[in-house]
Image (cartoon, rainbow, N blue to C red):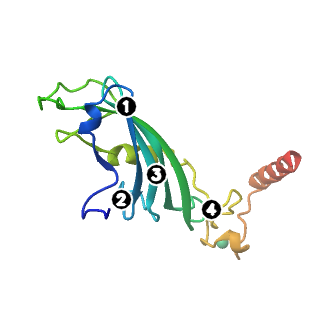
Amino acid sequence: MSKEKGSSSMIFNVAQLMKSPVGTSVASDIDEDNAQLDETLKITSPLVGHARMRRVNQGLLVDGWLDLTLEQTCDRCLKRIEQPMHVTFEELFYPTVDVLTGTPLPPIEEDDVFPIDEHHQVDLTEALRQSVLLAIPMATLCNPDCAGLCPQCGHDLNLGPCECKPEVDTRLNVLKTLLSNSNHDQS
Ligand SMILES: [Zn+2]
Ligand SMILES: [Zn+2]
């Protein structure tokens, strides 16, 4: 079956599942070639993953995983890095209309839940966006030992030392000696 134009593997019609008994589940692959989850994220790979939707009392419990590659920059030397990520998610989706009668349902007063829209569709985009943002590490380094850039001339110190003269400050040098000694002690 070819993919319909404009169709998304992150949007599912769950009308049948919502009519099914609690405990019923369906699973589906996620495969998006040109997905853009968030304007701050530069995704350089297809989104590939798997989602399982399970009928629970309140609605649907959706869990699964997603693999993607993000383009980021090293915090120290600003080099571009391709960062592969494996993200898992588990979210509750609640119905906004009754699946049998079409009657609007009162909104659920709970945080961290997502709506099943009035066409009985689940859109995973927002849930996946939040999961990916949460999974991004606080610090991004091209290499744990990245030497960074010279604060004076901007030279990439991973490529070797620059011509800058170290700032002369005896207190700083004493501190550097102490630090390098303590590094030696650890190794
Ligand atoms: Zn770096
Ligand atoms: Zn320099």
Residue type, numbered disc 1: Thr
Q: Position of residue 147 (x, y in %)?
A: 69, 63
The residue mark sitting in front, 4 or 3, is: 3
Report which quarter residue 159 is drawn in. Answer: bottom right
Q: Which residue is identified by label 4?
A: 142
**Contact, CB < 8 Å: mark 2 with mark 1?**
no
Q: Which residue is identified by label 3?
A: 49
Marks 1 and 4, how far apart in space?
44 Å
Above or below residue 21? Residue 120 is below
Q: Residue at x 69, y 56 (%)?
A: 144
**Contact, CB < 8 Å: mark 1 with mark 4?**
no
Q: Between disc 2 and disc 1, whose residue precedes?
A: 1
Q: Secondary structure at mark 1?
A: loop
Q: Position of residue 39 (x, y in %)?
A: 35, 57
Q: Say whether mark 4 is within 8 Å of ligand 1.
A: yes
Q: Which residue is identified by label 2?
A: 36
The residue mark sitting in front, 2 or 1, is: 1
Disc 2 crowd, CA 10 A, few/some/many (<14, 14-19, 20+) = some
Above or below residue 50? Residue 158 is below
Quarter of the figure that contains the N terminus: bottom left
- Split into quadrants, the picture shows ligand 1 in the one at bottom right
Q: Position of residue 70 (x, y in %)?
A: 49, 60
Q: Residue at x 72, y 66 (%)?
A: 166
Residue type, numbered disc 3: Gly
Q: Between disc 2 and disc 4, whose residue precedes?
A: 2
The residue mark sitting in front, 2 or 4, is: 2
Report which quarter residue 26 is drawn in. Answer: top left
Dot label at residue 24: 1
